[in-house]
Amino acid sequence: MEKKEILKSGEFLVREVEAKDVFIPEEFNEEQLMIAQTCKDFLAAEVYPNLAQTEKSDREAMKSLLKKSGELGLMGISIPEEYGGFGQSFVSQMLVAETTGAGYSFSVAYMAHCGIGTLPIMYYGNEDQRQQYVTKLATGEYIGAYALTEPGAGSDANSGKTNAKPTEDGKHYILNGQKMWITNAGFADTFVVFAKIENDRVLSAFIVESNWPGVVVGPDEHKMGIKGSSTCQIYFNDVKVPAENLLGKRGEGFRIALSILHMGRLKLGANVIGAAKKAVNDSVKYANERKQFGLLISTFGAIKYKLAQQVIRLLAHESTVYRVSSDIDAYMAKVKNEMPDYGRAAIEAISHYAVEAALLKVYGSEMLDFIADEAVQIHGGMGYSAEMDVERGYRDSRINRIFEGTNEINRILVVDTAMKRALKGDFDLFPLAEKLYEEIDAVSDGAVAGEDYFAQKKRYTRNFKKIMLLLMHSASKHYAKNLVNEQEVLNNIAEMMMEVYSSESLALRIEKMQMMGRDINIYKDVLDVNMYDTAELVRKMAYDAIYSFAEGDQALKLVKAADTLTTVEGVNVKDARRRIADKLIEDNEYKF
């Protein structure tokens, strides 16, 4: 059997993969589709009929829903069978995250439990901790939560003040401190709590049970959206934590927190797909019912534009999510041969893709915000009414740009982490960039006569990557170690990286669909518009970055290179978007 080509994290900047080596949603197997259908059925039967109740911050109503999902086995998707779960692949875990993403506040509570509330113990816990806690969390007997953020420590988590002091006999830690924005706090049975032991400079992690003396849970916060999820402050007043409840090693808490954030970002990238599909469906169904001037609004070009843009951005992001997820599965299989402990191997593979995790989080959350906003606009005045799902979806979507590290932090991480990986020798970014810069006067768009459709798109992608490499090289030379402080320039490069990676993933998906014998005509419209728009965005971001640091001859050379490398064939975007919208309108739901 031919081995699949797996890129390391960030390596997409300098290497290509073939379409045959990319996993696409059209390849989901029967078991995966059955799991997804179970999730959809659960939302329809249990979640949607109870939205009004859970939106009143009814803790018991939400806890009941979570328990029912546990009884169905939905909480054990990512947990190995020996701990009461089903041990599904990362692709399957992401499909569940996607499907449940259409569940509004339930999705937040469910994902917090299954992800950050459970997996730190699964990945970093010892056998006793897994048997004691993971087996109960996997079935819903226990509900889990994750307590990292403090009033004075948000993005800078390591500056937290919560403290743990060992007792003289060494049998306990005395925990004191305060945590905030803790999802599921109002009804959780266990918390993964981060604190510094004595005068340590870095965090440690503890498993704390909510019924222990000294654990005080505050009232639910009043929030803009996700009103059905319980979000509270927690106070720890001289809580006696058994020494055996230290999670991982002393001082390993910061590493645990970072690793779990990578996992959370990836899962959020999938979660927003479900919410986006729900919003697109709501949009087209309303457009097919609402009349103005005697005509259905779905016949208007301005509405078709909006519907098409929703589809284009959603399809691109979905392509990216499953490409990365399959790479993680493949990398996990490799790591398992080197690391005997399943949990450590799994989180090692997930953490490896830190660049893509940050990328998915930003691109996905902003994709959903765009779609949710347009869904309200398509509904007009009704979209502002609390009786419509799109109103709730609009409010709920906003938190995703803050969850799991703000998008501002993650944009910087996309570039900074990729460059650090390259400097470590993971891939040859800087030698290639140096060579490109030396040959900048001879830069060409590389067009050839008789180029086929996908060869053309691959050439565009290669060219987009070249301008990114030129900018990384030039900015690094100009700013040296101060580049990390030039956040505007890093944002320009991050924006390019995200758009190009998603465009490349979309192109690979559609090429593979063609290999599978699928009719791809409408998908070519999606790709044509996407690439055309990507070229414009890459050019704009390149200009912004170049004029931020380059002058004179260097600026002229870089601008000329940007113009050359972002040259793409013209597209009749009006007609292409109308064809995309017409398919959506005819299907009356998202069937791409």
Image: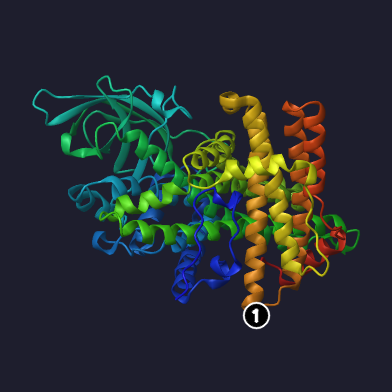
Q: Residue at x 29, y 45 (%)?
A: 124
Badge 1 marks a residue whose secondary structure is loop
Of 324 and 226, the residue lying toward us? 324
Q: Residue furthest right?
A: 293
Of 204 and 290, the residue lying toward us? 204
Q: Residue furthest bottom?
A: 517
Number of numbered discs present? Answer: 1
Percent x, y of residue 397: 60, 45
Percent x, y of residue 98: 52, 58
Q: Residue at x 32, y 58 (%)?
A: 336
Q: Residue furthest left?
A: 169
**Which quadrant holds the N terminus?**
bottom left
Q: Looking at the image, can residue 10 be seen?
A: yes
Percent x, y of residue 351: 42, 47
Which residue is label 1 attached to? 517
Q: Looking at the image, can residue 314 be seen?
A: no
Quarter of the rendering containing residue 429: top right
Quarter of the rendering containing residue 409: top right
Rendered position, 134 above or below 431: below
Percent x, y of residue 496: 68, 44
**Which quadrant holds the C terminus?**
bottom right
Quarter of the rendering containing residue 525: bottom right
Q: Is residue 455 left or right of residue 399?
A: right
Rendered position, 503 above or below 108: below
Q: Residue at x 24, y 62 (%)?
A: 82
The kind of residue tagged 1 is Gly
Q: How is the image coloured?
A: rainbow
